[in-house]
Amino acid sequence: MDGLIAPLLNGSAQGALLLLAALGLSLTFGQMGVINMAHGEFLMIGAFSAYLVQQVITASGLSIPVALPVAFVVAGLFGLLLEVTIIRWMYRRPLDTLLVTVGVGLILQQAALQIFPSQGVPVEKPRWLDGQLTILGYSWPMRQLFTILLATVCVAALSAWLKYTSFGRRIRATVHNRDLAETTGISTRGIDRLTFFVGSGLAGVAGVAASLIGGTNSQMGAQYIIPAFLVVAAGGIGQLKGTVIAAWAVGVALAFFAYWTTGSLAQVLAFILVIVFLQLRPQGLFTVRTRSLA
Amino acid sequence: MTKKPWISLGGIGVFAVLLLAVAPLVLTDHWLNNLGKYCCWAIAAVGIGLAWGRGGMLVMGQGVFFALGAYAMAMHLTLETAGDRVPGFMVLYDPLAPLPMFWEPFRSAGFTLAAIVGLPVVVAGALGYALFKRRVKGAYFAILTQALAVALAVLISSTIRETGGDTGLSDFKYFFGFVLNDPANRLMVYLIAAALLIVCLLAVWQFYRSRFGELLVATRDAEERVRFLGYDPANVKLVAFVVSALMASIGGAMFVPIVGIITPAEIGAAASILMIAGVALGGRASLFGPALGAIAVGWGQSSLGSTWPDGWPYILGLLFIVVILFLPNGLSSLPARFAAARRKPDVPPTPVIAAAELEEVRS
């Protein structure tokens, strides 16, 4: 039993981090069909924002709560800029957005490498994240608990926002039928921008969480982007609950594989697991029923 | 584009003369070796052009197949260099280490050559069959292939004792009995790579003008219609995918004796994306575009990448953005667009793209 609790809790935290990284993707990819490979770099921008906030507010207990909204806005603005300058021209060519954003990601990575020290920057952990919580004989670091809490709050906020606010209703209307939404007076262009802003902003929030767990450097985005995409794909397009379950499952699977074998082999096994899963359910866990042929 | 296939064939002839006869005469040994390296990338790029440009499958993980060919060749060359002993890097960690089981058959030259051809065909065949039959396509396919490239690179990095890990395999002395240090033998290796590139171009030229080529383009543009016409699009895509994997493997296999080292960095996500960059630049659906684009990007990588390492990623990133945004069919579509613009000077550029794409569909 002891051997199972540790990877289970560890994995849940990893899953929460994956979920945070995948949440914004699930919005931009799932709702808009844009494949944003620069999403990982937006995550990196969020992490660096946390570092910059700490340069201004030195009390680390206060800086992280401040950094979360700042990272959201900064990464969101980068996303907005990307949408306004490039993505808007490419809605008819979804596969090409993938390559364009690969280019954007390369540029952002190199810019970060030149602006910040190449070995990365330290993001100080607040003292209230130092403790541990003992569950069934396993002392669980507060940092992991914080990640899970943050992910829960983000999912709840996002789904409530999509469901109950007029913005959310307009987003859903645009996704379901763009032309009809436009005839009812919804500015679909504005909705596109807003969706992209929120999706990218969520990457920024994920970046703050990632900076508390791993290193903050120019390469950090690249290591999250593929797992995050696999999570979105395995969860199913356009539905948050699929993303949540898939992220948790991948996180726990990663932790168990790492527990039984080694860290790098676990990554390989988790990738293969997702690929096999997509064999069984090519549309992901949950699918929105459509009449399209694919 | 293939309206006049014999012109393209003539183009391949000119290209062959340039690569096989002119280049060895004009270029120094150093640049000839570099050109050989670009040819290896170009071979893989020709395959990407087939799968992506003509088949609509964005293969973002050609590094996997590049690796299969490269490591098969590298293992053989390592064993040939080591002779009867166990390769040096293995003994480093454990002096009495036995040779891993899967290395043993690579002692045989015949097996190695068969593996370079057979491994990618089997792997791509199984993977493609599974994915295409389940109608996995578009972004999903691209992400999955990229994930495989990442996974393989991680796997190789982590198995230091079996594959050399991050330092890779290097220090090859012999190439099927020929001493690699000898300039004459290096010229021979270059000529083999260049000749293989020409062979791949010829194969793709024949593919494009065959009924299969038309079916492939039809599958790219309207998969459902192809299905309703009674073909199985999965089989069409499978063939294109397997052929492109085979080309990547051949490119990888020739990469090893020319460059002299293979590491996970040459096959991972970044390397796989670099292979795509050349294809996008040259023109994904054209015959020469992928090969010329790959040579250009390879040249940029090794010249600008070393003289101006801080600037090269910006150039590469801008290349992706500008080319995909403004020239989805790459530089090779420029002449057609100029011609179209001259015919109808008042027409805004967007319809021209549509016209060019339509023409491509028809060709």
Image: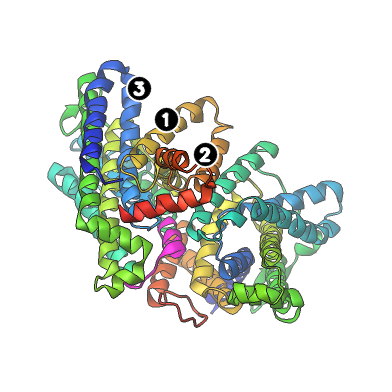
**Amino acid type of the residue that numbered disc 3 sits on in the rendered structure:** Trp
Chief SS of the magenta region: helix
Is residue B186 shown left or right of residue A39? Answer: left
B143 in the magenta segment? yes
Instruction: Identify the residue under disc 2.
Output: B316
Q: Are marks 2 and 1 in contact (CB under 8 Å)?
A: no
Number of other residues with Cα within 10 Å of mark 3, as a class: few under 14, some 14 to 19, many 20 or more: some
The quadrant in which residue B334 appears is top left
Using the rendered image of the protein, determine whether residue A261 is visible from the camera's viewpoint.
no
Q: Which residues are magenta?
A: B133-146
Number of other residues with Cα within 10 Å of mark 1, as a class: few under 14, some 14 to 19, many 20 or more: some
| First reached walking from the N terminus: tag 3 or tag 2 | 3
Nearer the observer, A5 or B217: B217
Instruction: Identify the residue under disc 1.
Output: B299
Q: Please name the residue shown 70% across and 58% down the image.
A: A204
Q: Please name the residue shown 42% across and 61% down the image.
A: B144
| First reached walking from the N terminus: tag 2 or tag 1 | 1
Q: How far is mark 3 from mark 2, CA to CA?
A: 22 Å
Query: Residue A141, image x and y in percent?
Result: 69, 66
Q: Are marks 1 and 3 in contact (CB under 8 Å)?
A: no
Chain for numbered disc 3:
B
Instruction: Identify the residue under disc 3.
Output: B31
Q: Secondary structure at mark 3?
A: helix
Query: Residue A66, image x and y in percent?
Result: 83, 59
Res. A92 mark: none
| First reached walking from the N terminus: tag 1 or tag 3 | 3
Whether callout 2 and callout 1 share a subunit is answered yes
Using the rendered image of the protein, determine whether residue A256 is visible from the camera's viewpoint.
yes
Is residue B142 shown left or right of residue B105? Answer: right
B300 in the magenta segment? no
